[in-house]
Every structure is written in structure tokens, then in C-alpha cells.
Image (cartoon, helix red, strand yellow):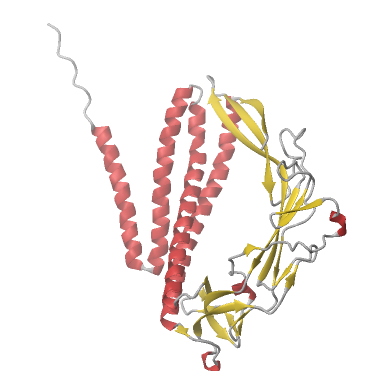
Amino acid sequence: MSEDTYTEVSNESWFSRLGGAFKGIIFGLILLLAAFPLLFWNESRAVKTYKTLKEGGGAVISVNGFEPANEGKLVHVSGTAATEASLSDPVFGVSANALKLRREVEMYQWHESSKSETKKKLGGGTETVTTYSYSTGWSNHAISSSGFKKSAGHENPGSMPYRSEELVAERITLGAFTLPPSLVSKISGSQSLALPSDLPLPEELAGRAKRQDGGLYLGQNPASPQVGDVRIRFASVPAQEISVVAQQHGSSFVPYQAKAGGAIELLQEGRVPAEAMFKKAEQDNAILTWILRAVGFVLMFAGLSMMFKVLSVAADLLPFLGNIIGAGTGIIAFFLAALLSLLTIAAAWIVARPLLGIGLLVAAVALVLAVKGKLGKVQAKPAMPPPPPAF
């Protein structure tokens, strides 16, 4: 893999930075305001999902197959997802009896990455050194080189000669049931599918394509790829055992609408008991909840940091002073973001579970009092006694 670099040095005056910091206050306020509904919605979603799964865990029944008496009920079924269909790639003619057939196309292209280092200067200005690195590698989508900082010598083809594509069998069954598209989309577990050696290639590839590792290579030498070379591979998702939890609807399934307000439609590979499937769904709900909490906190912290940045930029006339104020505002932004996030989460839980919400609210107040007490001790610390008078 080849690589080269291009370095650019730019300078920004203190007045320009100050103007940008004032504009950042508006954008920071937008981020801060966006964090509140995100955190509130996330907690409401988490509670609704939790109640929905608990309700479903008590209502689900495990069945061995289709029974008309279970119409409208939440059922758990395990078996083999299969199809009688034979899928065929419309361009290359590769075919297989499979649930899904995938064509995976990659092209060797230039990639651009950048790294910047900014240094403050006396008087509040900054000097930024940006290094752009160019390397070649495989990508499954076309990379436009027109936006590169230095496009000369790093030109990529404008488009992919072929696109990645997935074909899905029209009818996939689970015993006597027919799986709906929403459940079929959750089936994975692909495996490589070799291109048959006797399969004729499209006429436009005559003399250009080489068979390699069960796929095709469009280029001169697979051991030494050049920009514009293409490799094509195929994969299939074969018949496999799965477990489903959903509402029986005729000889198919639909999402089960719980009284708690959520919907249940689960699928896992293998023969998995209903209890284990619900436990996995609860774990996924908890993980998503914490991810969105982190996103909300980061939005608040970023927003507050941008709103406070004007203070450190104003003090950057003396760089060391700006660094001190920047560190201080960063700490303040962190604690404010933590406090506001906790208050928002507490408010959401007061609506769903008052006792837990009040507990979180008490924790937020305790955090404020702890920080205030710490600051009070620092301010009340006695000064050094004056030296004794000289005789």
C-alpha cells in the first residue's frame, strides 16, 4: 500500500477566533437544547420497552407449528428457515438455493485522511499545521477524489463498474409459517459462495477478468493492485435453524402490540428458548439506553463547551491564561452536563416510576451540594499567617 503526504499551514487572528467563538454560542445552544428531548425520550422508550418485554414474557407460548387456535397470540417457534427458490445474480449468473444471495464489489482507490495540530501564539492568534495523508486500499463504494485537498496524482474513477447487491427469496418458510420481510431482514449468517469454474463470464469481461479465490478480479495483477482494479465476491445465506417470537397472523407473523405500548418481534439464530430470547432483548434494551444516555451527555457537554469557549478565546491574548480558563470552563461544562443529564433522566422517571425518579432527583441535589461544599471549603481556607514583626 503506497502513501504520501501534503502539509498545509494556516493562521487565524484573535479577532477571527473571537468571532467564531461567538457564533459557536448559537450552535452550542442548539446542541444543548437538542440533548434534553433526546434524554427524556430515551428514558420513556426504555421504560416502555422494558414493560413490553415483561408483558410479552408472561404471555408468550411455545408451539411446535401452525395451529389456528393460536391466531392473534404471541407465539415462540423454533425450526428451519428454508426456501425452494433458486436465486441467480442477474449479471454474473451465479446461482444458489439460498435465503439470500449477495454480490460484494470492492474497488482499489485513493483514500484521504488528515491530522491537524494547532498552536496558540502571543496575541491570541493560532497557527494550524494540517497534514493530509493519501493511501490506497479497497472500498465497497466509490470515493470522490474531487474533494481531496491535493487531487492531482490521487484521481479515483468516477464510479463503480458494478454495485454490491443482495437478492432475497420471495418466500421463506419456517415449518408451515411464511416469514414476513421484517423477520427475513434479521436473518444473517452468510457464507462464501465460489464462482463455478465452468460458468461463462459476461462478454464485456472477456480478457479483463481473472478468477481469484472463488470470485473475480478485474485488473492486471491481483498481487499488485492498481487504482481502479475491482474484485467481486459472492456469498449466500443458506437454510438455517432460527427461533421467532411474534404474533401469529394466519400462517405468518406480525409484531405483537403489547398493552404497554411497544411491539415484540424477535428473531435469533439457532434453537433458542423463549426465556433466553426475552433476556437477550432486555440486555439489548439496556445497552441501547446507555448508549443514548452517553450521546445525550456528550451533546450537552459539547454544547456547553462551545458556549463557554468565548471566555478562553478572549483570554488567549496571553496563551497561558487562555489555557487555564479553558481547563476551568471544561471542568464546569462537564459537571453541568452531568447535572443536567441526571435531572432530565430523573424527570423522565418521575413520570414513569415516581419513586425511582425522586431518588435520582435526590442524587442530583446531593451532587450539587457536594460540589458547592467543596468549593466553599476551598474559599474558606485560611490564608498564610503574616510573618512576625522584626525586632
Most extreme residue toward the bottom is: 69
Q: Whole-percent x and y of residue 101?
A: 69, 67
Residue drawn at (53%, 73%) of the image: 267
Q: Does residue 240 appear to the left or right of 213 in the view shown?
A: left
**Above or below for 229 versus 254:** above
Residue 154: image quadrant is top right
**Above or below for 292 versus 15:** below
- Is residue 333 in view from this perspective? yes
**Above or below for 77 versus 3:** below
Residue 287: image quadrant is bottom left
**Above or below for 166 versus 367:** below
Most extreme residue toward the front is: 198
Residue drawn at (55%, 93%) of the image: 68
Residue drawn at (33%, 64%) of the image: 356
Residue drawn at (14%, 14%) of the image: 388
Q: Whole-percent x and y of residue 102?
A: 69, 63
213 or 260: which is nearer to us? 213
Q: Whole-percent x and y of residue 317?
A: 51, 22
Q: How many marks?
A: 0
- Is residue 51 in view from this perspective? no
Q: Whole-percent x and y of residue 220?
A: 79, 44
127 or 338: which is nearer to us? 127
Q: Quadrant of the N terminus?
A: top right
130 or 344: which is nearer to us? 130
127 or 15: which is nearer to us? 127
Most extreme residue toward the left is: 391
Most extreme residue toward the top is: 391
Q: Does residue 149 appear to the left or right of 58 in the view shown?
A: right
Q: Quadrant of the C terminus?
A: top left
